Image (cartoon, helix red, strand yellow):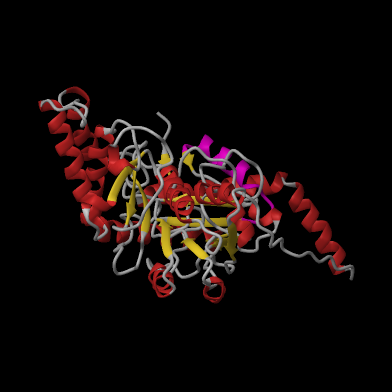
């Protein structure tokens, strides 16, 4: 059997065996509908409420502030559209977000712009950190909502959420953050960080797909996006995914308890991976935060770019060796346009296209990393030999050596992320 080295954990993760074990009874034994009044229904409802308590406790919230959703994309849509439509007025119609958001946030804002909302996209620096001075300048009396991603899904940069939340609180503005990638990888406390709404997801941290949650601070009013029954405090109707909810809570229980240990382990492996690739491959660069501390970058994220090759070709060739990677968000990886995140940090088209995202997990081993490094070196060398970009650069170098300089400018425009089925 071909060796599989999975380094695409930002797209999805292997479900922990303990999570699967916790879920199984709710498929075959405790399969009642939580809305039913009989014994099986009551037991299912108890399981849902126990899970709600577990997830609330993990972020310092109350159980009644947690609503279950189908995943992070739905949570983002409910938070942004539900809140803004409920509270829009002639005086308050500005939404502040960033140029590096996940498509679920970006597209929600695009939809609202068509309804008359004023959307402001904050700039980021070359490492993906927002311009705090721009945020301060934009926080005027017309601001309805600020939505800024916590840990970026492509380059791993972690924003200073506590400072952002403090600013929003000082201006009496509701603050939402998409913590899909950072939840249970780094500590989060909604009160300490002044977070009013927070998006969470199970399948990025060894839980099942198809289940997520949204924290909504008590007192914040939301318009539901759908009509239906009274489920989830009348904010998200539909029969509960009980096995998914139970699995989500079990994953949170495990990952919260093991967070520090796991972060230390994957960071050490990630740092080793980055160090080897930067040292052993010429024309290799790190995208995102150069500060690899857990406070500045997701501990499992390495996003690198390679001169003179295309990331898509690199992904396909590595897959032939059993190494699973990506060029960016799984939601837009099938599209060959440059990543809007890499565009926002100032990379020109050809450099953005040469990027590779490697995301590790607690199941990754040092042998996996060594195997991946050797194959990446081999594939990069092979692709460069075939690349027209290499030949073009050689010709340009020859022209420069002969006194004919060629100069280009990076594209700082914002490209739009593609439509996406899940965060």
The quadrant in which the C terminus is found is top left
Please state which of residues 184 and 76 is positioned toward the viewer in this rendering: 76
Vertical arrangement, residue 416 with respect to residue 20, above or below: below
Please state which of residues 224 and 362 is positioned toward the viewer in this rendering: 224
Residue at point 40% right, 69% down?
165
Q: Which residues are magenta?
A: 306-322
Please state which of residues 288 and 343 is positioned toward the viewer in this rendering: 343
Vertical arrangement, residue 135 with respect to residue 92, above or below: below
Residue at point 27% right, 53% down?
65
Left of 379 or right of it: where is 82?
A: left
Looking at the rendered structure, the number of numbered marks drawn on it comes to 0
* Residue furthest to the top: 28
Report x, y in % for residue 146. 48, 62
Left of 132 or right of it: where is 257?
A: left
Report x, y in % for residue 419. 57, 41
Tell me if residue 253 can be seen. no
Report x, y in % for residue 368. 40, 47
Residue at point 19% right, 25% down?
31
Residue at point 81% right, 66% down?
407
* Residue furthest to the front: 90
The image quarter in which residue 408 lies: bottom right
Left of 62 or right of it: where is 193?
A: right
Please state which of residues 27 and 41 is positioned toward the viewer in this rendering: 41
Left of 272 or right of it: where is 125?
A: right
Report x, y in % for residue 392. 80, 53
The quadrant in which the N terminus is found is top left
Residue 308 within the segment the image draws in magenta: yes
Tell me if residue 58 can be seen. yes
Residue 39 within the segment the image draws in magenta: no
Vertical arrangement, residue 238 with respect to residue 299, above or below: above
């Amino acid at each position: 059997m071909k060796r599989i080295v999975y380094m695409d954990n930002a797209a999805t993760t292997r479900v922990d065996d303990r999570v699967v074990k916790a879920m199984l009874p709710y498929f075959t034994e405790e399969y009642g509908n939580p809305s039913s009044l009989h014994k099986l229904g009551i037991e299912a409802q108890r399981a849902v409420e126990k899970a709600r308590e577990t997830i609330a406790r993990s972020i310092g919230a109350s159980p009644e502030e947690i609503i279950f959703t189908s995943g992070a994309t739905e949570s983002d849509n409910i938070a942004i559209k539900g809140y803004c439509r409920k509270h829009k007025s002639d005086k308050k119609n500005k939404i502040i977000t960033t140029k590096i958001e996940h498509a679920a946030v970006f597209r929600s804002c695009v939809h609202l712009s068509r309804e008359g909302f004023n959307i402001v996209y904050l700039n980021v620096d070359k490492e993906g950190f927002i311009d705090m001075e721009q945020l301060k300048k934009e926080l005027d009396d017309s601001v309805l909502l600020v939505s800024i991603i916590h840990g970026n899904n492509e380059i791993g940069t972690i924003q200073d959420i506590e400072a952002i939340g403090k600013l929003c609180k000082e201006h009496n503005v509701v603050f939402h953050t998409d913590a899909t990638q950072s939840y249970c990888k780094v500590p989060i406390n909604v009160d300490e960080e002044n977070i009013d709404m927070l998006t969470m997801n199970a399948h990025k941290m060894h839980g099942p797909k198809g289940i997520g949650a949204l924290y909504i601070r008590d007192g914040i009013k939301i318009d539901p996006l759908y009509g239906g029954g009274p489920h989830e405090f009348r904010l998200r109707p539909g029969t509960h995914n009980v096995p998914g909810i139970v699995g989500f809570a079990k994953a949170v229980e495990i990952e919260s308890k093991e967070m520090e240990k796991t972060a230390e382990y994957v960071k050490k492996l990630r740092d080793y991976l980055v160090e080897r690739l930067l040292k052993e491959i010429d024309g290799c660069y790190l995208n995102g935060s150069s500060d690899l501390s857990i406070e500045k970058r997701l501990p499992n994220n390495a996003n690198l770019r390679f001169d003179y090759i295309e990331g898509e070709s690199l992904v396909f060739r590595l897959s032939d060796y059993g190494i699973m990677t990506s060029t960016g968000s799984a939601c837009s990886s099938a599209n060959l346009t440059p990543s809007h995140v890499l565009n926002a940090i100032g990379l020109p088209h050809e450099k953005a296209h040469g990027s590779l995202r490697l995301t590790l997990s607690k199941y990754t081993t040092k042998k996996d990393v060594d195997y991946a490094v050797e194959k990446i070196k081999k594939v990069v060398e092979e692709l460069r030999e075939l690349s027209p970009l290499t030949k073009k650069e050689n010709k340009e170098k020859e022209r420069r050596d002969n006194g004919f300089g060629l100069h280009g400018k990076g594209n700082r425009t914002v490209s739009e992320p593609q439509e996406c089925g899940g965060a």
